[in-house]
Image: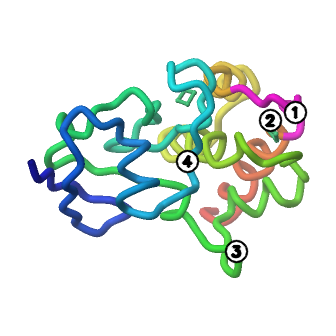
Amino acid sequence: MTVRLTINGAERRVESPPDTPLLYVLRDEVGLNGAKYGCGLGQCGACTVQLDGRPVFSCLLPVGALEGRQVRTVEGLGTAASPSILQRAFEEEQAAQCGYCIAGMIMRAQALLDRVPDPDEAAIRAHMQANLCRCGTHMRILRAVRRAATAMRSTVS
Ligand code: FES
Ligand code: FES
């Protein structure tokens, strides 16, 4: 079965069996390794990507259900040489320890900032609570999201 979907703005045809989780398709067929396998159960958020602008657990999504959908991964935000505002904020706050959770954290946070440019502390905390950091850098991650929101506001104004 061929599934057509858009990944980071480019149309792709993928051939994995339809019950294959999107996470495996991204990593093993498409070669995008940013999203990580943590639990495979929708409990950690390491695999978070965006589907039509919403953060989703890609470990739980069978690719066969995604015909025509828009997927965005951390590779679609920026590069090491040219990071996005949010990626730069994560660097500046030194939010990563081992780094395993960070791509998922960034994709979840970006979905919030795309929808709510000026989130308050409660909104940031509520939105980010679905993603876990085994290293316990949550406070730095929250600071990075706040820093990015401030930077994005000053870019717009
Ligand atoms: Fe998907 Fe943990 S690997 S939520
Ligand atoms: Fe290690 Fe978050 S930085 S899991």
The amino acid type, in three-letter code, at marker 4 is Ala
Q: Mark 4 near mark 1, Cβ–Cβ under 8 Å?
A: no
Depth check, front residue: 92 or 73: 73
Instruction: Residue 21: give x, y in percent of width and height.
Output: 35, 36
Q: In the shown orientation, is residue 151 left or right of residue 45?
A: right
Mark sitting earlier along the chain (1/3):
3
Numbered disc in front, either 1 or 3: 1
In the rendered view, how is the structure colored? rainbow
Amino acid residing under circle 3 = Ala
Which mark sits nearer the N-terminus, 2 or 1? Answer: 1
- Ligand 2 lies in quarter: top right
Camera-side residue of 153 and 102: 102
Residue linked to disc 3: 80
Alpha carbons under labels 4 and 3: distance apart: 16 Å
Q: Residue 142's mark?
A: 2
Secondary structure mostly seen in the magenta stretch: loop
Task: Return the x and y of residue 76 as percentages of the image width and height.
Answer: 48, 64
Q: Nearer the viewer, residue 118 or 31?
A: 31
- The tag earlier along the polypeptide, 3 or 2, is 3
The mark that comes first in sequence, 4 or 1, is 4
Write down the region rendered in magenta.
Answer: 132-140
The residue that disc 4 covers is 35
Q: Residues within 10 Å of mark 1 (few under 14, many from 20)?
A: few
Distance of mark 2 from mark 1, alpha carbons? 14 Å
Whether label 3 touches label 2, CB < 8 Å: no
